Image (tube, rainbow, N blue to C red):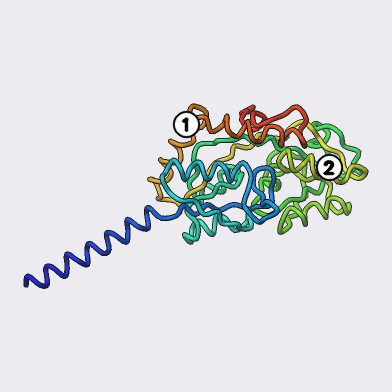
């Protein structure tokens, strides 16, 4: 009986240690590394960008090594729920629809969303954009590019594409009229296609950006919120300003990190 008890105790210890090792292992952070200056890759293949730096700062706060997992944006929520990643830090807008699948932290950025329109529409103002009926609004699936027109536009026609590149192709080809995207991407798309697009500079919406965790992972959610609430006080935002203000200003003259910290709603 004593031997059985010792064996049982040993098995409990093994399982306990395994659980601890899992909890204290790498923090697997999912993001789509195609969205500079937030998520991108250096020429040597190293992940880089504002979200990458935020992820490493979170890992340091938690005392866990960080592994950046590069995934298609549309697959991030699935990867979270299948436990292929632990947290999403990917410029993901907090929406009611996504809240049905995952839990979000408090916002740590607010993205001004701008609209790139085809010049043939003749539209140059936000007022005209929202008042014009039957425009074809294009965007990648799972992006707010497609939900905003349904809320705000007049009789919108929705064209869903697999990714942003495909959406931009439809716009520049004249098959779509409008594409809502984050400010830095919108400016880049317009600058690459100045003869066939207009850029509506008035934001159509300010989108709150949060980190995503699997439902029920309350411990990680609480710790991530503690980290977010200390971003200013602990100097993380200042470090990001110092590193990225000049990068942001390349696409958005006169702007820096604070452009993404304003909640204008």
Residue 94 placement: quadrant:
top right
Q: Secondary structure at mark 2?
A: helix
92 or 20, nearer to the observer: 20
251 or 144, nearer to the observer: 251
Say whether residue 258 is left or right of residue 7. right
User: Mark 1 = which residue?
Assistant: 230
Q: Position of residue 115 (x, y in %)?
A: 78, 40
What residue is rendered at 75% in x and 27% in y?
A: 254
What residue is rendered at 17% in x and 68% in y?
A: 8
Q: Farthest residue in the left direction?
A: 1
Residue 190, labelled with which disc?
A: 2
What residue is rendered at 67% in x and 55% in y?
A: 44
User: Which of pointers 2 and 1 lies earlier in the amino acid sequence?
Assistant: 2
Q: Farthest residue in the front direction?
A: 44
Q: Position of residue 255 (x, y in %)?
A: 72, 29
Q: Disc 2 vs disc 1: which is toward the camera?
A: 1
């Amino acid at each position: 009986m004593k031997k059985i008890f010792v064996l049982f105790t040993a098995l409990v210890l093994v399982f306990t240690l395994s659980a601890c090792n899992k909890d204290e292992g790498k923090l697997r952070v999912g993001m789509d590394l195609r969205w500079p200056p937030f998520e991108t890759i250096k020429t040597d293949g190293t992940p880089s960008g504002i979200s990458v730096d935020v992820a490493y700062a979170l890992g340091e706060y938690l005392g866990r090594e960080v592994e950046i997992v590069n995934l298609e944006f549309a697959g991030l929520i699935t990867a979270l729920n299948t436990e292929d990643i632990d947290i999403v830090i990917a410029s993901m807008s907090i929406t009611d629809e996504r809240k049905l699948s995952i839990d979000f932290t408090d916002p740590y950025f607010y993205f001004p969303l701008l609209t790139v329109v085809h010049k043939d529409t003749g539209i140059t103002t936000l007022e005209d954009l929202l008042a014009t009926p039957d425009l074809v609004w294009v965007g990648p699936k799972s992006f707010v590019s497609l939900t905003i027109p349904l809320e705000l536009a007049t009789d919108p026609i929705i064209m869903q594409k697999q990714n942003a590149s495909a959406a931009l192709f439809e716009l520049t080809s004249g098959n779509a009229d409008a594409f809502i995207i984050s400010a830095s991407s919108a400016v880049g798309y317009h600058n690459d296609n100045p003869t066939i697009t207009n850029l509506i500079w008035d934001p159509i919406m300010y989108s709150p950006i949060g980190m995503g965790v699997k439902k029920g992972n309350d411990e990680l959610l609480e710790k991530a919120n503690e980290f977010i609430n200390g971003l200013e006080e602990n100097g993380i935002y200042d470090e990001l300003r110092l590193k990225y203000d000049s990068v942001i200003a390349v696409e958005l003259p006169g702007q820096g990190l604070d452009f993404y910290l304003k909640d204008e709603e």
